[in-house]
Image (spheres, rainbow, N blue to C red):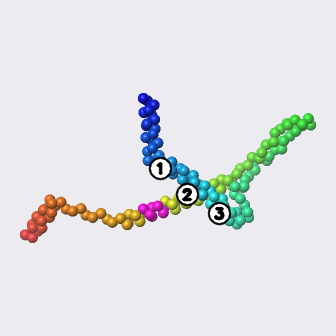
Amino acid sequence: MAKSGFISEFKEFAMRGNVVDMAVGVVIGGAFGKIVTSAVNDIIMPPIAMLMGNVNFSDLSLVLKDAQAEVINEAGEVVQAATEAITWNYGAFIQNIIDFLIVAFCIFLLIKGINKLKKEEKAEEPAPAAPEPTAEEKLLTEIRDLLAKK
């Protein structure tokens, strides 16, 4: 009994309109993210790199510790394993900031466009007609008008 109640409760939760709408938003958001990433990497950044002397932001880094080559003794045994350089990749951070700003700007324009469409829809809708006065209101209006004449 408890299982079927739990399953039906989960089914009710999962099929709720908000959850489905959110799932659709996540999927579309992922696709939109790919489009924006491509726009940044393939369209916006190449001219910026050209202006800056063919600098790729993703490649900008500061070496904190140089790479170490493998150390082998005379017997051919590895005394110290090779280590990679430790770098501070500030260029990737700059690239991510640019990506974020472009995504935020695109979403701003999208929301602004949607709000403009909503305003246009509201403007096109005719104003609701005034409701017809009830018989009682008509009678009271006649009485008022008669009293005003005297």
Element marked by disc 3? helix
Question: How many neighbours does mark 1 have within 10 angstroms: few (below 14), some (14-19), or many (20 or more)?
Answer: few
Between 107 and 74, the one lying in front of the other is 107
Q: Position of residue 23 (x, y in %)?
A: 51, 48
Question: How many neighbours does mark 2 have within 10 angstroms: few (below 14), some (14-19), or many (20 or more)?
Answer: few
Question: How many neighbours does mark 3 have within 10 angstroms: few (below 14), some (14-19), or many (20 or more)?
Answer: few
Q: Position of residue 96 (x, y in %)?
A: 63, 54
Segment colored magenta:
112-118
Q: Main secondary structure of the magenta part?
A: helix
Q: Is residue 139 above or below residue 10?
A: below
Q: Residue at x 81, y 42 (%)?
A: 82
Q: Identify the image quadrant of residue 146.
A: bottom left
Q: Earlier in the sequence, mark 1 or mark 2?
A: 1
Q: Which label sits in the foreground, 1 or 3?
A: 1
Between 126 and 148, the one lying in front of the other is 126
Which residue carries the number 1 mark? 21
Q: Position of residue 43 (x, y in %)?
A: 65, 63
Q: CA distance from mark 3 to mark 2?
A: 17 Å
Mark carried by residue 104: 2
